[in-house]
Image (cartoon, rainbow, N blue to C red):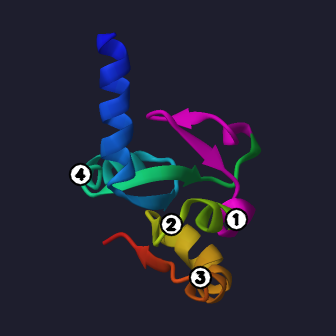
C-alpha cells in the first residue's frame, strides 16, 4: 500500500514539472539532468551512437537525434538543452527552425 502511495506522489510531482530533452549522455548531461530536476522533468537523452539507443541514464531512455521533433510533440517539450558544443554546432541549425514552430526553445548549456 505504501509503495502505491509513493509511486502516485512521484508521478504527481513529475507531472507538475516542465518536460525537457537533453542532448548528450556524458557527465555534463547527467549534471544538467540532476541540477534541473526541481523544475524540469527529463523525458529523453539524445545520443547518435547506436549502441546507446534505448539504454537508460538515471532511469531516462536514450533516443536518436532524428526522434527529437516527435518526442517534443508527444510530450509537450518546451526546452531542448545541448550539453556539448560539438552536438550544438552539428544538430542545432537544422533543429532550431523545426522546433521554433512548435514553441520549443533550444539552448547550449553554459
Disc 2 to disc 3, C-alpha distance? 9 Å
Disc 4 to disc 3, C-alpha distance? 24 Å
Q: Which residue is mark 3?
A: 102
Left or right, residue 43 beside residue 69: left
Q: Looking at the image, which is closer to me, 102 or 84?
A: 102
Disc 1 to disc 2, C-alpha distance? 10 Å
**Precedes in sequence: disc 4 or disc 2:** 4
Q: Is residue 28 visible?
A: no
**Precedes in sequence: disc 1 or disc 4:** 4
Q: Residues within 10 Å of mark 3 (few under 14, many from 20)?
A: some
- Relative to 56, say whether 18 is above or below: below
Instruction: State the image coordinates of residue 31 (x, y, percent, origin top left).
Output: 32, 49
Mark 3 touches mark 1? (CB < 8 Å): no
Disc 1 to disc 4, C-alpha distance? 25 Å
Query: Is-magenta flag for residue 60?
Result: yes
Q: Looking at the image, which is closer to me, 94 or 89?
A: 94
Mark carried by residue 77: 2
Query: Is-magenta flag for residue 87?
Result: no
Left or right, residue 33 beside residue 68: left
Mark carried by residue 6: none
Instruction: State the image coordinates of residue 24 (x, y, percent, origin top left).
Output: 52, 55
Instruction: State the image coordinates of residue 13 (x, y, percent, origin top left).
Output: 30, 44
Disc 4 to disc 2, C-alpha distance? 16 Å
Disc 3 to disc 1, C-alpha distance? 11 Å
Image: magenta residue range? 51-69
- Relative to 58, say whether 24 is above or below: below
Amino acid at each position: 500500500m505504501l509503495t502505491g502511495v509513493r509511486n502516485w506522489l512521484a508521478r504527481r510531482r513529475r507531472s507538475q514539472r516542465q518536460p525537457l530533452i537533453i542532448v548528450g549522455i556524458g557527465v555534463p548531461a547527467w549534471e544538467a539532468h540532476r541540477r534541473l530536476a526541481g523544475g524540469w522533468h527529463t523525458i529523453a537523452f539524445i545520443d547518435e551512437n547506436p549502441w546507446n539507443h534505448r539504454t537508460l541514464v538515471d532511469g531516462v531512455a536514450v533516443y536518436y537525434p532524428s526522434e527529437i521533433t516527435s518526442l517534443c510533440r508527444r510530450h509537450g517539450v518546451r526546452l531542448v538543452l545541448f550539453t556539448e558544443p560539438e552536438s550544438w554546432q552539428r544538430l542545432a541549425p537544422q533543429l532550431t527552425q523545426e522546433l521554433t514552430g512548435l514553441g520549443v526553445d533550444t539552448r547550449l548549456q553554459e
